[in-house]
Image: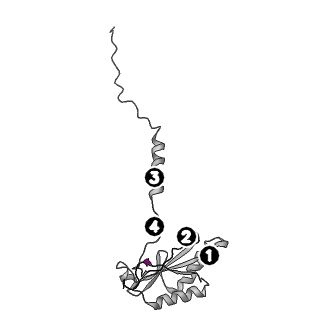
């Protein structure tokens, strides 16, 4: 009989995973706070015109965005180089504006429908004809609250 017992080679003690859920939730909250949701994927060129008297829209009411401009270089082969209308993430024709507004209204609560504002983000190089056609379609569907989005600057010197 030996007087000394040999130590068993049990290896390293197991790592405690008790704090693992805390670390996962901490990372989850960090990414939820730090992540910015991209509004729309622009498929058109959208260099906004400048204006010196601008007013910020109140975000407490719903806003629908309509983009007008020439397709990006990635989409010129598919859609040509004429001015196009982008509704949400898709390039559409002017005739689809009424259906777009109807879908936007259907997604809203009833008390917010009269407060729906349509924001037109028109490229400074866009032709007036497409814009006029879009405004006529908005008038037909009784979407009369229209906003033109611009960037701040001197309207005369930016041309």
Quarter occupied by the N terminus:
top left
What's the CA distance linking mark 2 and mark 4? 16 Å
Q: Where in the figure is residue 95, as x and y percent of width and height?
A: 53, 86
Would you say 104 lies left or right of 82 here?
right
Q: Which residue is mark 2?
A: 59
Rendered position, 26 above or below 147: above
Nearest to N terminus: mark 1 or mark 2: 2
Name the residue at 46% across, 39% down.
Answer: 19
Nearest to N terminus: mark 1 or mark 4: 4
Q: Is residue 113 magenta?
A: no
* Labels 1 & 2 near each other (Cβ < 8 A): no
What's the CA distance linking mark 3 and mark 4? 18 Å
Q: Which residue is mark 4?
A: 38
Q: Where in the figure is residue 34, as x and y percent of width and height?
A: 44, 57
Q: Any mark on residue 30, and which? A: 3
Q: Secondary structure at mark 1?
A: helix
């Amino acid at each position: 009989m030996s007087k000394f017992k040999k130590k068993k080679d049990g290896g390293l003690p197991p790592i405690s995973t008790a704090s693992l859920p805390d670390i996962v939730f901490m990372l989850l909250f960090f990414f939820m706070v730090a992540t910015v949701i991209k509004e729309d994927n622009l498929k058109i060129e959208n260099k906004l015109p400048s204006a010196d008297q601008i007013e910020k829209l109140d975000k407490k009411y719903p806003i629908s965005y309509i983009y007008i401009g020439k397709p990006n270089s990635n989409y010129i082969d598919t859609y040509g180089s004429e001015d196009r209308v982008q509704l949400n993430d898709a390039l559409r024709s002017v005739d689809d504006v009424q259906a777009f507004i109807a879908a936007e209204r259907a997604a809203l609560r009833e008390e917010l429908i009269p407060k729906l504002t349509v924001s037109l983000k028109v490229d400074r190089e866009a032709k007036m004809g497409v814009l006029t056609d879009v405004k006529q379609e908005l008038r037909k569907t009784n979407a009369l609250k229209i906003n033109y989005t611009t960037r701040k600057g001197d309207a005369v010197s930016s041309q």
